[in-house]
Amino acid sequence: MADQLQSFDNFKLNTQLLNAIKEIGYTKPTPIQEKAIPLALAGHDILGIAQTGTGKTAAYLLPLLFKVKYAQGEHPRALILAPTRELVMQIESEIIGFGKYTDLRYVCLYGGLGPKPQIEKVSQGVDIIIATPGRFMDLYQKEVLYTRDIKTMILDEADKMLDMGFLPQIRAILEIIPVKRQNLLFSATFSDRIEKLSHEFLEFPERVEVAQQATTAGTITQSKFFVPNFKTKLSLLEKIVKDAKFERGIVFTRSRKNADEVFRYLEHQQPGSIRVIHANKGQNTRINSMDEFKKGSIKILVATDVAARGLDVSMVSHVVNFDVPVIYEDYVHRIGRTGRAENEGKAFTFINPAEVYHFEKIESIIRMQVPQRRVPRDVSVYDTPFEEKQAYEREIDKQKRGDDPDFQGAFHEKKSPPKKAPEKPQKRGNKNSKAKRNRNQMKTKGKWKNS
């Protein structure tokens, strides 16, 4: 479409949706919405490639709500699959906003809590299901879900679903829903695996791409710091979060252990203004923490990648990658939590010696060199403990062996060969020892004979 649409009125959506759009405050469609909505309304299968924060949820929800129109029957007519419960909840909030003036019924299905309330809601009648693949299949196997009326299937954040190992469940779901349906697949990146999935999932799709693969939003100012160790990272993080321009931020870590350590450190500095979420936290704790963060009740959210997607907060001023993600596409999703809705944001990444390799790969994927900043002079730089230094060296060796199987390893070369145990000196005049040596010598020469 050559001419840019200036208003949602051009899509010829129904009055209920247009009124809701105006109340939400949307004035004009984003590029992904401008391209995808007309194609979806026309009934095409769509392969949508768009970075996070570009409005792709509305790009598939508005056509879906227009198509489903009103409550009808008892069984679902549309299915939206998402990789995490957080993203399911975000999609739900969007449906609540856009579907405000409709009577459409929806159910969210995700793990982390008992299925009984979800089963009861399904039994009351439903038009749209938003679900994680695992919980959807669990309830289907319990014979709770009737799938033969599903006419629209949407995969959101498909790349993340593959990273999380949901491909078997997705294939199983494709086996139990009608073949004749409209399919929409949205992803922030377009890898070989996504291309293969699109061939299985989509039929003659229209490809919609509003940015190059894995590009980052132009509203985000990115910076990287080379930091020698974990303790220095904590010191630098303390400096950044105390900056007056740090209004509300997310700190991403690679592991639950690191998330808890960062939380304890910051909680000691700024008690009451920080929460932490990861897979070990209960469902209610995670929901409450995110709600507090969205409302602005807390300043800092420390999280693993469980929150990298599905957290839609427009006024996040900073994202800090305390650890470099080893799933490189997650970098785009992490920093995409800031710079949303045309607001400006800052993204800082701390890189220890073992993470240099990974960040270079990330820069290759996003096709840019992230500007380097020096660690400020007033930040304490600590010596790296011996065990931590050894861990870095092992990891660097592993990376080099991955690129070159013949690489022996710098860490390997530093190891001394195992020392042989010193032979015990023979006591002079010990007749038994002398006789034993004579027998061993005869055995070596093949002269030992059984008596």
Image (cartoon, helix red, strand yellow):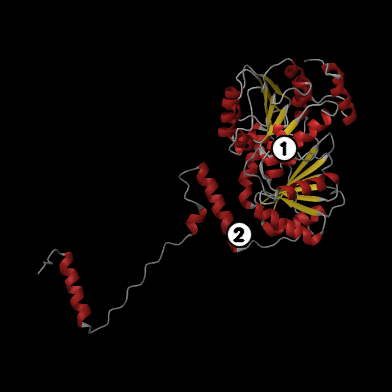
Q: Residue at x 72, y 23 (%)?
A: 73
Q: Residue 52: horizontal and vertical position, in percent?
A: 74, 34
Is residue 238 found left or right of 327 in the rendered image?
right
Q: Residue at x 47, y 43 (%)?
A: 405
Identify the image quadrant of residue 104.
Answer: top right
Q: Residue at x 56, y 54 (%)?
A: 393
Q: Residue furthest bottom?
A: 429
Query: In this figure, what is the number of numbered marks?
Result: 2
Q: Nearer the viewer, residue 158 or 368?
A: 158
Q: Quadrant of the C terminus?
A: bottom left
Q: Secondary structure at mark 2?
A: helix
Q: Residue 250: horizontal and vertical position, in percent?
A: 77, 47
Q: Is residue 406 above or below residue 380?
A: above
Asked whether the viewer can see residue 369, the reply is: no
Numbered mark located on residue 402 in the image: none
Q: Residue 268: horizontal and vertical position, in percent?
A: 78, 62
Numbered mark located on residue 87 in the image: 1
Q: Amino acid at mark 1?
A: Leu
- Alpha carbon separation for disc pair 2 and 1: 35 Å
Numbered mark located on residue 388 in the image: 2
Q: Residue at x 86, y 48 (%)?
A: 245
Q: Residue 270: horizontal and vertical position, in percent?
A: 82, 59
Identify the image quadrant of residue 124.
Answer: top right
